[in-house]
Image: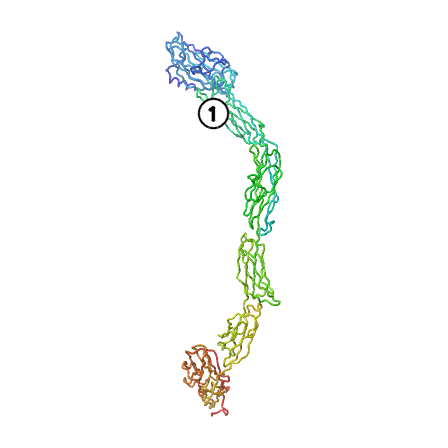
């Protein structure tokens, strides 16, 4: 390191610089007895000339001082006319890890004391070398190259800074040395100046710390209502007691003993002591801690501390949370050299701790209690009737006992001890309602110094309303004697849930009554009539009523009637098929003298267009020709309500058909048939020959029949049938002209069209008839149609003749005709 530094100096100075010849060097330092303060009046760190000495520099130098040194070089007559040489100025830098000097300035020519030919030296950089000179660990030096003439004296001034912590340097002295350029004393002799280490005073930091906390009175406040809940079961009740309820409330406050309370105020004062003979800039960072946890930090910023002065550099005031324990403070100072601008390594530290002490202030020693009460909920109000206990008054002009919906405020006088106040209050419901609300009371205790606490109480209020639903019922005056009737209902709410099953009963002579369903919640209800004991009454449509508060009642009305009885008639004919067209007449109460009639259309029941009253009724039929009365059932009856409500009285008339069809001799006329004088043929005889029929007698006959037109157009079939297992021959229609249709008066009818759909069969189509019109039908048959047929076995064949209208039998010959063998078995 030294070789490299020297090479640098030589490279920048005159070539061939060597040890001085004929030069007497002298190294001196400024001895400070404590009276010297730097810089001097010219701003330089140079002592008065008289203070320089080559001996001990005294007790006046301390840490961070810039200790002045002076190098005097005297060239005598033996010196060359001019020479250039290099010397080294050096100081102890560090030993055993402890600092000595940490700055070595550039020597400056003292023009006052130097010969005029002396010039400023060439100076190398401050350099550290290890191992150091004189056995220490590290030496700090500069190489100084000087050009000097014979018989001249050149004086150079410089300084070295005592490092922060140099008072701990090992050994008894700190040295400044003058050496040759290879850092030895060869050629120039030993030159050193010392400072006694034990006399060096350190830069110091000290502090004071105090922690204080006020005491505070804590008050407690509680309140309790009686009862804790108010319930009004039925505000539809007209009784005043069902609309008002009393409640009492007690507020109690308790004063506790004063205890430390609130934040802790911590104050630390940090002082910096500068023993140096010059001003030093100090920057302090102070941390207030709880244990090792930092609570608050403050910094002083740069503070200039004059020479040999202890100065307050920072007052750190902090408020820390209550309960903070182990309060302590650590202040760390850093230093700035305003002259050299060379950083000052290291710091100084001061610590302190404090126990929290009472501040002497007791807060919230008295208090005032304010009670604020208000009510919520529709149709609710309250009154504060009175109070007892602590002194105080209602505010805002409130008069006790006055009902209101506005807040009521009460305030006590100043309280210095524990106490209580009790209030008597009344809650009132102003109209029928189903609601909820709250009687809210807040008691606020305010200490004299800002302490507050409060107690809330909430008295729940619920109001219910139970409405009445009345069902009114009326019926006709039909009950008599011991007759009774009960009607049943169901009441459903808006969710279709059955909430009641009321009933209304009636006895003889009663026509109206009602029933009330109570205890219902307000809302919409539907009343359904679901039946009666007899089941004979016509149920009425459901009725809906909405009962909304403040209305507490609603009514629905049912006017009941029974299902009126009806009369029906049915026609039965023997044989079946002639049920239509019969006229029946109903007579009885409420009908005109002639009654009311219906005409049958078939086999079904026909309903009389009349709703029956109470009393006896009779049904009669209008007779029809060709039929005889057989029986009747249910055609005379008595109606009794309500037993017969909805009943259908059925009447059945049975008539037997008396056939008019007739097989008659060939000479029979229409008039004979209609007058009833026509003869009757019941057999046709046959003769045989060689096993066959070879003759018949009579040879022809007529079939007559009476037909009533069912409509304007219809078909008449005259049908011939036989009953024999093997014989198949029928009597033939003589010819188509022998199929004839007459009016009832036996005149020919122009409405008929005739045909023969098959052997022995006749068909007549009627068009344009009047329903109910009577026609006479005549068909002439030829018995010779069986001649030539094998003799039947058995030998008798039975033939029937009937009349069909639209394929329904309406007439026939009762006896029919038998084909029988002639007695004797041969021809006639």
Instruction: Say whether residue 148 is left or right of residue 35.
Output: left
- Residue receiving disc 1: 301
Colouring used for the render = rainbow
Q: Residue furthest top?
A: 77
- In this view, the residue in front, 713 or 648, is 648
- In this view, the residue in front, 78 or 408, is 408
> In the image, is residue 38 above or below residue 269?
above
Splitting the image into 4 quarters, where does residue 423 fall?
top right
Percent x, y for residue 528? Answer: 55, 60
Percent x, y for residue 661? Answer: 48, 83
Instruction: Say whether residue 620 is left or right of residue 778.
Output: right
Percent x, y for residue 705? Answer: 47, 83
Splitting the image into 4 quarters, where does residue 367 fall?
top right
Percent x, y for residue 777? Answer: 44, 83
Count numbered badges in the picture. 1
Report whether residue 49 is seen: yes
- In this view, the residue in front, 784 or 815, is 815
Mark 1 neighbour density, 10 Å: few (under 14) some (14–19) many (20 or more): few
- In this view, the residue in front, 169 or 349, is 349
Image quadrant where one finds the N terminus? top left
Tag 1 secondary structure: strand
Report whether residue 131 is seen: no
């Amino acid at each position: 390191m030294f070789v490299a530094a020297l090479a640098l100096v030589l490279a920048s100075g005159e070539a061939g610089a060597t040890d001085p010849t004929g030069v007497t060097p002298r190294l001196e330092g400024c001895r400070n007895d404590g009276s010297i303060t730097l810089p001097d009046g010219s701003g330089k760190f140079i002592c008065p000339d008289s203070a320089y000495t080559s001996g001990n520099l005294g007790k006046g130098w301390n840490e961070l001082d810039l200790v002045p040194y002076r190098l005097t070089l005297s060239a005598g007559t033996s010196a060359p006319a001019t020479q250039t040489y290099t010397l080294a100025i050096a100081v102890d830098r560090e030993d055993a890890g402890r600092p000595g000097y940490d700055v070595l300035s550039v020597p400056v020519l003292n023009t006052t004391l130097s010969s005029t030919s002396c010039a400023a030296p060439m100076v190398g950089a401050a350099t550290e070398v290890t191992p150091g000179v004189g056995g220490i660990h590290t030496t700090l030096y500069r190489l100084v190259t000087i050009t000097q003439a014979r018989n001249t004296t050149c004086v150079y001034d410089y300084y070295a800074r005592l490092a922060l912590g140099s008072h701990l340097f090992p050994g008894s002295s700190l040295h400044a040395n003058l050496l040759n350029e290879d850092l030895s004393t060869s050629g120039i002799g030993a030159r050193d100046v010392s400072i006694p280490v034990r006399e060096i005073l350190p830069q110091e930091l000290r502090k004071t710390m105090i922690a204080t906390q006020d005491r505070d009175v804590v008050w407690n406040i509680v309140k309790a209502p009686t009862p804790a809940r108010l319930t009004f079961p039925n505000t539809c009740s007209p009784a005043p007691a069902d609309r008002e309820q009393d409640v009492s409330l007690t507020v109690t406050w308790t004063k506790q003993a004063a205890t430390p309370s609130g934040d802790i105020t911590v104050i630390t004062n940090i002082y910096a002591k500068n023993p140096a003979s010059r001003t030093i800039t100090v920057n302090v960072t102070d941390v207030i801690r709880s244990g090792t946890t930092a609570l608050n930090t403050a910094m002083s910023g740069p503070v200039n501390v004059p020479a040999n002065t202890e100065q307050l550099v920072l007052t750190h005031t902090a408020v820390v949370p209550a309960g903070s324990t182990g309060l302590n403070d650590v202040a760390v100072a850093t230093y700035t050299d305003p002259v050299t601008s060379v950083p000052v390594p290291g710091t100084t530290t001061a610590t302190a701790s404090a126990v929290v002490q009472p501040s002497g202030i007791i807060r919230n020693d008295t208090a005032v209690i304010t009670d604020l009460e208000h009510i919520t909920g529709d149709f609710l109000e309250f009154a504060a009737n009175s109070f007892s206990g602590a002194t105080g008054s209602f505010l805002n002009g409130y008069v006790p006992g006055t009902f209101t919906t506005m807040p009521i405020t009460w305030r006590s006088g100043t309280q210095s001890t524990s106490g209580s106040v009790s209030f008597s209050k009344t809650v009132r419901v102003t109209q029928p309602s189903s609601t909820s609300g709250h009687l809210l009371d807040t008691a606020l205790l305010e200490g004299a110094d800002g302490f507050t606490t409060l107690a809330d109480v909430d008295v729940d209020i619920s109001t219910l309303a139970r409405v009445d639903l009345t069902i009114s019922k009326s019926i006709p005056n039909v009950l008599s004697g011991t007759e009774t009737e009960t009607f049943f209902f169901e009441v459903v709410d808006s969710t279709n849930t059955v909430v009641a099953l009321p009933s209304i009963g009636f006895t003889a002579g009663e026509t109206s009554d009602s029933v009330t369903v109570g205890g219902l919640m307000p809302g919409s209800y539907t009343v359904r009539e679901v039946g009666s004991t007899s089941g004979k009454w016509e149920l009425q449509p459901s009725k809906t009523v909405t009962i909304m508060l403040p209305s507490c009642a609603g009514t629905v009305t049912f006017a009941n009637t029974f299902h009126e009885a009806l009369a029906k008639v049915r026609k039965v004919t023997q044989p079946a098929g002639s049920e239509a067209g019969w006229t029946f007449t109903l007579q009885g109460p409420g009908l005109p003298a002639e009654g009311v009639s219906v005409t049958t259309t078939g086999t079904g029941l026909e309903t009389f267009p009349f709703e029956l009253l109470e009393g006896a009724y009779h049904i009669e039929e209008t007779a029809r020709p060709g039929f005889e009365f057989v029986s009747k059932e249910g055609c005379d009856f008595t109606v009794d309500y309500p037993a017969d409500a909805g009943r259908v009285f059925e009447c059945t008339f049975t008539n037997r058909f008396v056939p008019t069809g007739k097989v008659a001799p060939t000479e029979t006329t229409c008039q004979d048939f209609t007058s009833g004088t026509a003869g009757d043929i019941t057999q046709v005889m046959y003769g045989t020959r060689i096993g066959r029929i070879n003759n018949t007698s009579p040879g022809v006959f007529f079939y007559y029949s009476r037909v009533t037109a069912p409509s304007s157009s219809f078909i008449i079939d005259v049908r011939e049938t036989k009953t024999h297992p093997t014989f198949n021959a029928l009597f033939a229609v003589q010819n188509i002209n022998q199929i004839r249709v007459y009016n009832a008066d036996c005149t020919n009818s122009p409405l008929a069209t005739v045909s023969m759909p098959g052997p022995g069969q006749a068909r007549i189509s009627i068009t344009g008839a009047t329903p109910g019109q009577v026609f006479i039908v005549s068909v002439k048959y030829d018995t010779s149609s069986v001649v030539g047929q094998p003799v039947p076995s058995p030998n008798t064949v039975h033939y029937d003749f009937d009349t069909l209208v639209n394929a329904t039998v309406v007439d026939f010959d009762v006896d029919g005709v038998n084909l029988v063998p002639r007695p004797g078995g041969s021809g006639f």
